[in-house]
Amino acid sequence: MSYFVKSHRLYLNGQQVGYQASPNRSGIIQPEGVILHDTAGRLDKGSSVGWFLNKAAKASAHLVVERDGSVTQMVPFNVKAWHAGRSVLNGRSGCNGFSVGIEIVNPGSLDAVAGGYQSWFKKTYTTGDGEIRAASSRYHGDGYWMDYSEVQIASVSGICCALAQKYQMNFVEPHWFVSPGRKRDTNPLFPLDHVRNLALGRADDAEELSEKMVIATRLNVRGGPGVAYEKMEWGPLGGESIVKVLDQDLDESGRVWSFVSFAGNNGWVCDTYLTD
């Protein structure tokens, strides 16, 4: 996915993402980083955007990322969105005044019940709605959580990279980090270190980067590690293209897949068709 920022609006593959203006905003800001949130609401596409467009919500974010990876922008990046509430980062209070808020569609903490897992709003989900796993941390406690979709992670990663490049950002943090004890999003299944390192070029990820060459004439790029995932619009890669390998994973058959970066785009390719 090739995201970039122009005039404080988000673009994907040369086209501006959907924009619906939220009234829950105030003042001009200089964004210095990103705060990531879960919507902690229904998975229905457009449900969270609809709530943030309601003045009675008294809350919004700059972006909402749906389960299918699609994105809606509601506030320009140089305008304060009401997403973090009471918050502190490195001794500075009021994080809304210097951050971009990204809401990721996810139901939040779930409780095991007969027939599935129930959300705080009494909706019962099953593994057919998304992978649900038990997880815990000192910030979240124990619980059941729905994993994020591969395309959501790809979108959030690409967006954070584009924002960091445009505004020379220096942090990517979850809501629980800036509002400890009050908030628990993003959930413990979110790959925070991976997304943060991609966006900010931290050394611990940079040490793992390696360059490889494509040895196939045409190599499809997919949204996840396996042929079951959709092909990315910016592919395929041509023979002898040089890619940076950011991560690796196995598909269901045990084949190695590499998460690669090429010309500002990220996606998964079968490692069989790469060589050092």
Image (cartoon, helix red, strand yellow):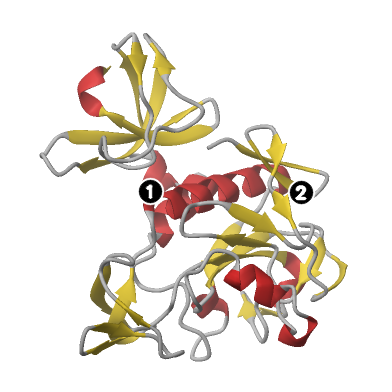
Q: Is residue 269 above or below residue 145?
A: above
| Residue 47 spot, x, y in % from top left | 59, 71
Residue matched to label 2: 9
Residue 38 placement, left or right of 95: left
What residue lies at 27% left-to-right and 40% top-to-bottom? 228
- For label 1, the SS is helix
Residue extending farthest to the left is 253
In the rendered structure, which disc, 2 or 1, sits on the residue that comes first in sequence?
2
Report if residue 28 is visible in the image: yes
Q: For residue 57, what is the image quadrant?
A: bottom right
Q: Residue at x 50, y 67 (%)?
A: 105
User: Dot 1 surroundings within 10 Å: few (below 14), some, or many (20 or more)?
Assistant: few
Please give the name of the residue rendered at 46% of the width and 36% of the height, measured from the top-left corner. 266
- Distance of label 2 from label 1 (alpha carbons): 30 Å
Q: Where is residue 273, by image quadrant?
A: top left
Q: Nearer the viewer, residue 271 or 30?
A: 271
Image position of 66 (left or right of 88): left
Is disc 2 surrounded by few (<14), some (14 to 19) or many (20+) residues within 10 Å? some
Mark 2–mark 1 CB contact (< 8 Å)? no
Q: In the rendered structure, find residue 20 and report the number of the disc placed on it.
A: none
179 relative to 256, above or below: below
Residue type at mark 1 is Asp
Q: Closer to the observer: label 2 or label 1? A: 2
Q: In front here: 165 or 70?
A: 70
Provide the residue designation for mark 1. Answer: 204
The answer to which quarter of the image holds residue 244 is top left
What's under tag 2, amino acid-wise?
Answer: Arg
Residue 140, image x and y in percent?
37, 83
Q: Where residue 37 appears, x then y in whole percent?
A: 54, 71
| Residue at x 36% of width, y 24% of height | 220
Eyeballing the image, is 269 above or below 38? above
User: Split into 4 quadrants, where in the image is the C terminus?
Assistant: top left
